[in-house]
Image (cartoon, rainbow, N blue to C red):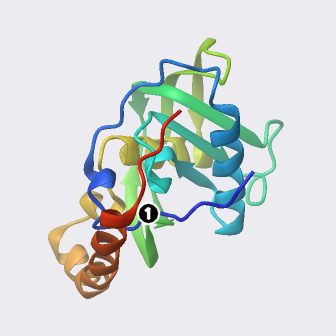
Amino acid sequence: MAVREVVHYGDPILRKVCKPVKDFKKLSSLIDDMFDTMYEESGVGLAANQIGVDLNLFIIDISGIEEETESVHIFINGEIMESSGESWFEEGCLSIPDVRLEVKRPEFIQFKYQDENGTEHIEEMRGLLARAIQHEMDHLKGVFIVDRVTKTVKMTVENDLKMIAQGAVTRAKTRKAFVL
């Protein structure tokens, strides 16, 4: 298990639509690394492309914020089937350090995914877990929280984004590709 470097805004991998997971047998160490990295960065969710891995995989642990029966979640090849309702919430992102924005998202989702064994599930989610899933699904589709706000709001963080992106592009050129 190891903490990996979090990829920042401006790195091209974060704008790609991630590839589906096909081989579930070799995911264990990657998932462990993702949890180590997320906890080290004090996050509640992390998508694989945020550590430079082009796979449709993300993890969530909202137990530090919201008490629920299952605190640790692993979602693979996820798809939001339906959504409804509306809620606003201030979101941050490990790939855009120190930027927080009010983002509107559906309150309820029906979510289809596979677990680490490849077993398919369909569940209805709401509240913070639904929001975190939508945030991480956005990552896997190349979408950021700054893409979910008005141009006026985005302009308020434009200088921060430019600074973050400058360093990210340089690091992207030296990153080694991850192979399962």
Residue 152 sits in quarter: bottom left
Q: Foreground residue, 123 or 33?
A: 33
Q: Give SS at disc 1.
A: loop
Which residue is denoted by mark 1 in the rendering? 7
Q: Position of residue 6 (x, y in %)?
A: 51, 64
Identify the residue at horizontal 50%, vertical 55% (top origin): 51
Q: Amino acid at mark 1?
A: Val
Image height check: is 87 above or below 161?
above
Count the labels in the image.
1
- Density class for disc 1 (Cα within 10 Å; few <14, some 14-19, many ≥20) is many
Image height check: is 154 above or below 57?
below
Identify the residue at horizontal 35%, vertical 60% (top origin): 145
Residue 129 sits in quarter: top right
Q: Position of residue 20 (x, y in %)?
A: 41, 25
Identify the residue at horizontal 63%, vertical 31% (top origin): 27
Q: Foreground residue, 155 or 20?
A: 20
Q: Position of residue 80 (x, y in %)?
A: 42, 27
Q: Position of residue 158 (x, y in %)?
A: 23, 81
Decide if residue 17 is on the left or right side of residue 139.
left
Q: Farthest residue in the top direction?
A: 119
